Amino acid sequence: MALALQTFATVKDAGAALKAAGARYLGGGTLVVRAANEGDVSISGFIRSTEPALSIIRISGGEVRIGASVTMAAVARHPDLATLAHAARAVGGPAIRNMASVGGNLFAPTPYGDFTVALLALDATVSTDDGELPIETFLAKRESNHAIVTAVGFTLPKEGGFRFLKVSRVKPKGISVLSIATVLEHAPDGTVSSARIALGCMADRPIRARAAEKALIGRELTSEGIAPALAVARDGTSPRTDPIASAWYRNEVLPVHLGRLLLA
Amino acid sequence: MAKVPVQFTLNGAEKAEFIDSGTTLLHALRDKIGDTSPKGGCHQGTCGACSVIIDGELRLSCLTLAETCNGATIATTTGLAEGGVLHPLQCAFLDAFATQCGFCTPGMIMAAKVLLDQTPNPSREDVVEALSGNICRCTGYEPIIQAVLSAARSNSQNAA
Ligand SMILES: Cc1cc2nc3c(=O)[nH]c(=O)nc-3n(C[C@H](O)[C@H](O)[C@H](O)COP(=O)(O)OP(=O)(O)OC[C@H]3O[C@@H](n4cnc5c(N)ncnc54)[C@H](O)[C@@H]3O)c2cc1C
Ligand code: FES
Ligand code: FES
């Protein structure tokens, strides 16, 4: 049986309706309609808001704000977000990218959430109808979050400062074995002065590789320079075994791919 | 359950229906409107057999709720032939033996149509990328890729 959809002009009204038991927010629907089609009985109906701000990308003075309903395709084709196009294109095939929203990706369970890995490395802020949260805090509590995400915001990294890699077995569109995003800054002598490394598929949601980040500071991006970071890349990871890869395999290949990304 | 109205343009014709709220576009097209060209393969977003073009963009009708398409312009494979003359993509699929059981074909053709509308002279990589969300269990893909490239070539020859 079809589950009723309620559409609201404002996020505020949609937020009030979302308090009903079993009500689920509808983004692009690639996960939530899929779950309903599969017979997920925890869903009692869909709520969405058509507030225009949800679909807008705003960039000024290097600060980016992407509305929660903006699709991966819209991010990928935005001329001022070329740095992120690769990460947005990593999500699904063309039809999925025309539907998959930035807001929905924040809730996508492993092995999905590739774009969120990029947002985590960018240290984005998640805006909801209930206030703003750093993305790491948001991700830690996302199941208990019943607010509507309205946008994500971040500072555009310096030219060449952002790197992203998705490893999948099926090309060009495959589900992640793992994904990695890094945002690095360098001191005048070329050594790393700040590092953020985010990992996808290395836990039940995207996580930061804190030990590897710390081990990169003051180091050069050479094989010897990054060796200590690679040695601790698995600290704090708890990958899952799924049909794409075993937990063992993910742990084995993580340092290899992180190394390639850092030396690229 | 209360019925809700939906209204959109399908292959150039105005359509208005009352549907159960939350009905997928695939269900509305096939079972209410009678356009059975989009196929329900997986209802999971995985196979691409239900692909349609909504306002110029490829979408999966199995994961799209029909009500979200109010006012939209939708194209399916049903609308491609004009006056009994097949679309160049349809001809190319037949000529290249790119359709066997035919279940994936309407989705493949819509994905290919969006590609050729935006990129009239695609590379092989462009074609592979454009079809990457569509699964075919019969052909092994190569004849489909060749059909799309051949349709692009015949389009550009006709335009020249
Ligand atoms: C075939 C296929 C391939 C895929 N491949 C990939 C892939 O390669 N990489 C990847 O990362 N993902 C992939 N996905 C998963 C999914 O498409 C993406 O993660 C997408 O970004 C989810 O967004 P959505 O708008 O479709 O979410 P929805 O399905 O609309 O929602 C997902 C969840 O988030 C909640 N939600 C959505 N928006 C909001 C909001 N604004 N506020 C509060 N809650 C919200 C919903 O209630 C729901 O619980 C794939 C899915 C399919 C079907
Ligand atoms: S039926 Fe929609 S993708 Fe398979
Ligand atoms: S022709 Fe049979 S699935 Fe493609």
Image: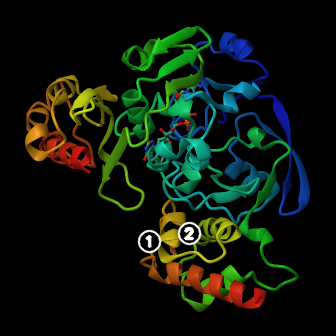
- Tell me the quadrant of the picture where the N terminus of chain B can be found: top right
Q: Residues within 10 Å of mark 2 (few under 14, many from 20)?
A: many
Percent x, y of residue A263: 22, 48
Pinpoint residue A93: horizontal percent, then vertical percent. 50, 55
In 3D space, how far apart are the residues under numbered discs 2 and 1 (Cα atoms)? 8 Å
Q: Quadrant of the C terminus of chain B?
A: bottom right
Give the SS element for disc 2.
loop
* Vertical relation: A10 (above or below) A240: above
Residue B137, numbered label: 1
Please give the name of the residue rendered at 55% of the width and 59% of the height, measured from the top-left corner: B48
Q: In front: A174, or A123? A: A123
Tell me which residue sits at (40%, 40%) in the image. Answer: A114
Q: Is residue A99 visible?
A: no
Disc 2 residue type?
Answer: Cys
Give the SS element for disc 1.
loop
**Amino acid at pointer 1:** Arg
Numbered disc 1: what chain? Answer: B
**Residue beneath the point at 66% across and 72% down:** B116
- Farthest residue to the front: give it: A188
Q: Which numbered dot is residue B104?
A: 2
Question: To which quarter of the image does residue A130 belong?
Answer: top right
Seen in the image, is B86 located left or right of residue B148?
right
In the image, residue A185 above or below residue B61: above
Mark 1 close to ligand 3, CB under 8 Å: yes
Q: Quick check: do tags 2 and 1 share a chain?
A: yes
Residue B105 appears left or right of A190: right
Dot 1: few (<14), some (14–19), or many (≥20) neighbours within 10 Å? few
Quick check: B153 above or below A100? below
